[in-house]
Image (cartoon, rainbow, N blue to C red):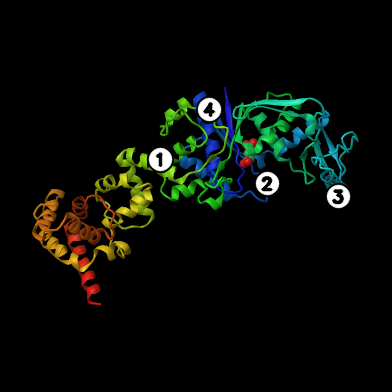
Amino acid sequence: MIKTRFAPSPTGVLHVGGARTALFCWLYTKKMHGKFVLRIEDTDLERSTPESVQAILDGMAWLGLDYDEGPFYQTQRFERYHDIIDQLIAQGDAYYCECSKQRLDTLRERQMAAKQKPRYDGCCRDLGLRPDSAKPMVVRFRNPQAGVVSFNDHVKGPIAVNNAELDDLIIKRSDGSPTYNLSVVVDDMDMDITHVLRGDDHVNNTPRQINILRALKVPIPEYAHVPMILGDDGKRLSKRHGAVGVMEYFDAGYLPQALLNYLVRLGWSHGDQELFTLPEMIDNFSLDALNRSPSSFNTEKLNWVNQQYLMSLPLTDVVTLVRQRLDRLEIDYDQNRDLATVVDLYRQRVATVNELVDSIGYCFQEFENYDEKAASKVLQASALEPLRRAQALLAALESWDAVSIHGVIETITEELEVGMGKVGQPLRVAVTGGSFSPPIDQTIELLGKQRSIARIQRAIDHISTNSAS
Ligand code: GLU
């Protein structure tokens, strides 16, 4: 059975790059009917925080990336790492090193000056040192000096590194803590990980990890190192480019399904298909179809995907999201009100749930100000007459529906011998505060008689005050 793991370090929020890696692990697991492990790599005590752990768990939960095992915390496994370090020492695959920082700094400077790759020179490798509480010591892995480490990366293809290029890496620091490469190897081994999918910033660690796994005489997992995500300027995606945290996308009104769909395409393709249901993603996913080159994050494309989901999700799901958002914003709306009609009218015109809520806000509460541009263009003296007539005719309407309202607007255009826009636009700005809404007859129907008439009055007053001043 295959087993993958997502192993974030809790030193910040779950960012989109991490979420994409987690998604690839999750998809591969589902496709292969395997298991997916969540492992929190919190050994960096200074930079790891409980808030980050929570942010990772929240992000995974919001995206629906459920795991079969974990979360495991590396800080709870120190004893196990120490046992393995002792085992490696006992079998001669690791040794104590007492080289001082000063010696290592000098060595490094000398190598740099000679244009050599800085690396440990193996000074303590054969000294057979024993731990000495009086001296700070580290433990190093005895990397083989000859031969080649090779593996077939699912994304990058065959990779081979000469052992001569690898030095004896530290696996236990002088403060006693295990290093990243050691704890990852022990965990991947203990958790029976068969496939390691991770960012390609770790590809240089892989030959070292393989050597340690070999020393421990356990199977070597398969590897897939996925290229990083870039910003629109071709640089590595970071805070500078805008939102990078998954939950920022929740706050901004994106749908988890849409973000997943966007992320899967950012680094994986299946023909020209852009939109995938989760079962489709699972069915078609394959490690070998992961892109080799980095992809750039494109908010416009994400908006497009989100819009497709907003339009195609069951209406009741979108209504639920709108209600949640209205509640979060503490917008006081009639709980019994049928939101479905207004949500349905607007969902094709917006990219996010937030935009949806912003656009329909005028249905539930008074807008504070008119959109400046719209008001200065449309709420002019020439709009007074159409607005007055509309107010009177609407007040007299017996049946409040879009068709009758449309009739009113038509009557006015005929009476005043003007085009639709001369009546429709002032009405739109009057009742919504801006110039963006679905057909005006439907908008007015939605808003209801009392509100519409009061708002037309407000616009008439606005124009009168402005032209008097
Ligand atoms: N903890 C590492 C990181 O967040 C990932 C290590 C791994 O996947 O092997 O970059």
Give the CA distance from mark 2 to mark 4.
Answer: 34 Å
Left or right: residue 461 versus residue 411 is right
- Which one is in front in this view, the residue at disc 2 or the one at disc 3? 3
Q: Residue 308 in the image: x percent, y percent?
A: 36, 39
At horizontal 46% and vertical 47% (from top left) the residue drawn is: 249
Give the labeled residue for mark 2: 44
Question: Is the CB of the residue bearing disc 3 within 8 angstroms of ligand 1?
Answer: no
The correct choice, above or below, for 319 with respect to 38 in the image is: below
As drawn, the label of residue 289 is 4
Give the labeled residue for mark 1: 305
Give SS at disc 2: loop
As drawn, the label of residue 102 is 3
Mark 1: amino acid: Val
Give the CA distance from mark 2 to mark 1.
Answer: 37 Å
Quadrant, the N terminus: top right
Mark 4: amino acid: Ala
Looking at this view, is 152 or 466 the one in front? 466
Give the CA distance from mark 4 to mark 1.
Answer: 21 Å
Quadrant, the C terminus: bottom left
Work out whether mark 3 precedes mark 1 in sequence or the reverse, and give the earlier one.
3
Give SS at disc 1: helix
Q: Residue 118 in the image: x percent, y percent?
A: 80, 42
Q: Residue 360 in the image: x percent, y percent?
A: 30, 53
Q: Residues within 10 Å of mark 3 (few under 14, many from 20)?
A: few
As drawn, the label of residue 104 is none
Work out whether mark 4 precedes mark 1 in sequence or the reverse, and give the earlier one.
4
The correct choice, above or below, for 227 with respect to 392 in the image is: above
